Amino acid sequence: MSDTESEVGSIVEDASDAEELDLTCLFCPKQLQSVPSLFKHGIEEHGFDLETKLKELASQGLAYSLLPESIGIKLVNYLRQQTSNGAPVPTAITLDTLDDDKLMMPVMEDDALLFSLGDFIPEDPKEKAVNYQDLENLRLDLDGVDLNVQAKEGDKRYFDSYKAAGIHREMIEDRVRTQSYRKFIESFPHFFKDATILDVGCGTGILSLFCARVGAKKVYAVDASPIAATASKIVALNGYSNVVQVIQGRVEDDSVRKLIQKASVDVIISEWMGYGLLFEGMLDSVLKARDLYLKPDGHVFPNYCTLCVAPAADKAWSTEQRGEKFWKEVEGFNFAPMVKLASGAWENEIAVLDVPDKVLAGQPVVFKTLDIKNLKVPDLNFVGNFEIKLANRDLGPIDAFIIYFDTFFLSSEQLSDLDTFDSNKCVDMEPPEGIAFSTSPASTLTHWQQAVLFVDPAQTIGLEKGDILKGSVRYSKIGDSNRGIQVQVNWDSLGGGSSRGTVTREMDN
């Protein structure tokens, strides 16, 4: 054993190695000389059965590929943290309670209890003992990746929103989405056969199962939502437990990094796209997973996305969206004040709507191309420019700017000319070039629909058909939020008309 190992010690240590210990009770200053005596004291004096709770949580954690030793460490540190100021002994402790990597750091200096629980934790035959030096090495071996691993309250709400069946049915029933992934995996099996795959945000595990079915050697299916428990059952029911390992946690977490070796994955696949492409901030996790786990010659799919913008000008459509006609007459009464209430949110927020292609006042253009293999997290705050020729028809004021995205699974890492790619031809892209799908108003409707920024019509008075609209679109994260986005469109018209303006809208949890 090295000097370092001797200093740090293994979490899983045989009790016989130390006949008499110096253990401090979790709830009072009393010193105990053995783990069993500490367990007994906890029950008799404080009404807390540490041994039973430890075994209960550790056994549950095995179902999600969580290290039992890590659960033991977190439980001890959590209890010391909660009762250090004389607070009552916590009773309702679950795996969610311990879902904070800061709990891996000792609350009490030289806490002997952390090194003495090995004989009382259910063993995971697939994993060896972990020690503090291993954990420190994991933190140091990140090559400057900003992981920001502290779970925020907003994260918990976000992940909990994916535990119900309805949202997963909506996504799977989106045939454009699901069939695009399936078609790419089955049309390009050489990327997946005998390969190690990481599915980031696996949900019910549908993408992992596609990969397993074409011959993947190993699939890590990672999801921080409680849906991971159900995904594990789905994998087992379909006979792929020997290939697909479902892990509950964020790809950035220490517990996940212990299970997936650095630079060991051949392919990362993920359905990370949100409304307006970047709402929910899941791409951040995909990029962190890429930097942690992907081999230098590995692949990330989808590998490209483009963001497109177009103006919309159609008074009847915008009036309908605002509910003006509906609220004007309700059972013989005028409910006009409801119009402001119904559409007032759109003065600040990004709307998500199914926009008819006919309301567009100009041909959509690409304002940003995202190269997922080379993109960095700070690059997700950006400005993209556009120039649009307005439609050759009579135009009223522009009512809104419409934003949508196209997604590409290209078989070659060489970038195609995506800036001029016709979204309407996405469905025609076939192997060997790749697979693509669009969320444009002209394409088959998806659950993403389109992001809509309604504008003050007074800002666009004077536009004429055929005018050139030049401008920019700025995407920014909202404050410290990883999930919310702020989008700002600036424009100026060139031609017979005259218009200049700015619209800023947000989308947050």
Image (cartoon, rainbow, N blue to C red):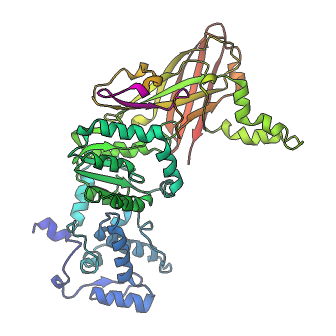
Can residue 377 be seen? no
Judged from this view, the residue extending furthest toward the front is 238
Q: Residue at x 40, y 31 (%)?
A: 436
Judged from this view, the residue extending furthest toward the left is 1
Query: Quadrant of the image for the N terminus?
Result: bottom left
Q: Residue at x 41, y 25 (%)?
A: 428
Q: Could you tell me how many numbered marks the image carries?
A: 0
| Image coordinates for residue 476, horizontal then vertical, percent | 50, 36
Q: Judge whether 20 appears above or below 138 on screen.
A: below
Say whether residue 255 is magenta.
no
Judged from this view, the residue extending furthest toward the bottom is 44
| Image coordinates for residue 391, horizontal then vertical, percent | 61, 14
Viewer-proximal residue, 470 or 232?
232
Q: Judge whether 273 appears above or below 306 on screen.
A: below
Can residue 77 be seen? yes
Say whether residue 440 is magenta.
yes
Q: Judge whether 268 appears above or below 374 on screen.
A: below
Query: Horizontal placement of 13 versus 122: left or right?
Result: left
Q: Judge whether 51 appears above or below 298 on screen.
A: below
Snapshot quadrant of residue 267: top left
Query: Horizontal placement of 11 versus 344: left or right?
Result: left
Q: Residue at x 49, y 58 (%)?
A: 163
| Image coordinates for residue 501, horizontal then vertical, percent | 63, 22
Judged from this view, the residue extending furthest toward the top is 496
Region of the chain picked out in magenta, as a range: 427-442
Q: Residue at x 34, y 22 (%)?
A: 416
